[in-house]
Image (cartoon, grey):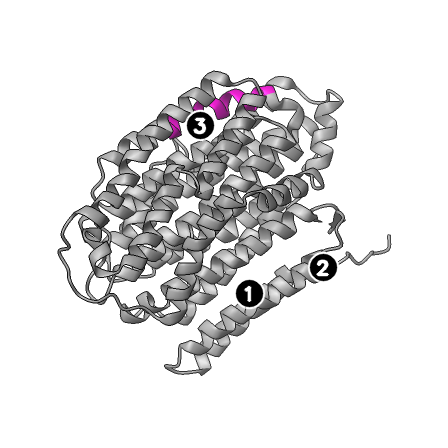
Amino acid sequence: MSFVAPNFTPALPEIFVLVMAAIVLMADLFSGRNRFVAYALTQVTLLGAAWLTVGASGGGTVHTFSGMFVGDVMSDVLKLMTYIAVFAVLVYSRSYLQVRGLFRGEYFALMLFAMLGMMVMISANHFLTLYMGLEILSLCLYSLVALQRDSAVATEAAMKYFVLGALASGMLLYGMSMIYGATGHLELGKVANAIQLGAGNSTILTFGIVFLVAGLAFKLGVVPFHMWIPDVYQGAPTAVTLFIGSAPKIAAFAFVVRVLGAGVPSLVEDWQGMLIILALLSMAIGNFTAIAQTNLKRMLAYSTISHMGFLLLGILAGNNHGYGAAMFYVLVYVLMSLGSFGMIMLLSRQGFEAENLDDFKGLNQRSPWHAFVMLLLMFSMAGVPPTVGFYAKLSVLQAALSAGFVWLAVAAVLLSVVGAFYYLRIVKLMYFDAPHDHSRIEAQPDMNLLLSMNGIGILALGILPQPLMALCVYSIQHSL
């Protein structure tokens, strides 16, 4: 039996990122105290990966490594958006990490390995590849949360994340094994064909789907698998919280769509009912619990839970229109999350974490421009036009309506109104309350520029959402 070499072209970005992560570790070892070398190499890695992703994109779908890995339009778009998110995380967190002694090579190496895991998840076409990518990402995130070794809160958050994450990984693996037992396949396309032809025991398949959805729900952070999110968001250094709350959501969306949309599409009636319950509970508990929070990072954690509920509205539609709307929603959410945590780091300084709501009091008097950027971000989170958050919510609501879930769309609108309260409360604090701190806001020029672009992007995409929405729908239609 002769060995046929696989086509490495679709996986060139992953190979490049893996090699560069090793180079970053070596460069940090030999550069002494000059940590900027590792930072610069990490940014170069992002540029190189983006160039290779665009170069390897042929506009079609290419399977390689015996069908375990796929290069398609959706994977290319999501990878490029992941690079942009990680680039923003690095720029926003540079000053924050420097003053806290966390600006180290291991931070950048872990971030690159985590991004490698996301890229593998995005391009996976096989249950084992999906699981491998997920574990690479998860192990790096556990380490990043505990990066501040002298902080008991960060260590506790990392332990909780690790224990619950291991439990969820076990459920996911068990679900995959049951589907393999029922169909005899692990490649997503072959699993879908086997189910379509009626192969396998329907009871085993249903139980497999239950365990799969439970594992996926934990990775998305939806109720009742949300317990880790508030503690991890609050306990981790804000730079790590920013990372966890942005780029991994893109990979989690790809994971869900690959498994449910490509692997088990004919079992839509089995997993649709579960997603309805998860979405409704997430929107309700996330929004109502966020009202009671005084810590902004914790409030944004519960906000994330409610946003993931809205994301599920698009996925549970079970068609390309719904998946396209969900993809649009997750990209918009990542943009909003980057800006929100970026503002927290902007107001933080040495020995002070600006993570309480009171720290935003009177921000308009200290810096009208930064207050305006935060206003745009909060309006978008709340779904107020003309920001892009309004169109993101509208798109998933339309997907739910088109699938016949009128009552669910009505409930989502009502719960969105509840959510608007705690976002607009921050606007009220910024513009109508007197500041506790009158010191001048100092930020690096690159951070100031990117934060301004982030806010303007929220507004510009709200005025012209069609190009991004069309790109999402196109990539879904040509990939699933």
Tag 1 secondary structure: helix
Q: Position of residue 161 (x, y in %)?
A: 36, 45
Q: Which portion, as a residue range, is magenta? A: 269-283
Dot 3 or dot 2: first in sequence order is 2
Amino acid on which disc 2 is placed:
Ala
Quickly name the residue at label 3: 279
Task: Specify the quadrant that holds the C terminus.
Answer: top right
Q: Residues within 10 Å of mark 3 (few under 14, many from 20)?
A: many
Q: Quadrant of residue 428?
A: top left
Dot 1 or dot 3: first in sequence order is 1
Residue at x 57%, y 49% (from the top left corner): 132
Determine whether, in the image, residue 434 is placed left or right of residue 150.
left
Tag 2 secondary structure: helix
Q: Position of residue 142 (x, y in %)?
A: 39, 52
Determine contact: label 1, label 2, CB under 8 Å.
no
Dot 1 or dot 2: first in sequence order is 1
Amino acid on which disc 1 is placed:
Leu
Let me know if residue 246 appears in the view: no
Quickly name the residue at label 1: 46
Residue at x 30%, y 40% (from the top left corner): 423
Determine contact: label 1, label 3, CB under 8 Å.
no
Quickly name the residue at label 2: 56
Q: Position of residue 164 (x, y in %)?
A: 38, 40
Q: Which mark is residue 200?
A: none
Disc tally is 3
Question: Residue 229: within the magenta?
Answer: no
Spatial distance from mark 1 to mark 3, Cα to Cα? Answer: 34 Å
Q: Residues within 10 Å of mark 1 (few under 14, many from 20)?
A: many
Tag 3 secondary structure: helix
Amino acid on which disc 3 is placed:
Ala
Q: Position of residue 199 (x, y in %)?
A: 73, 22
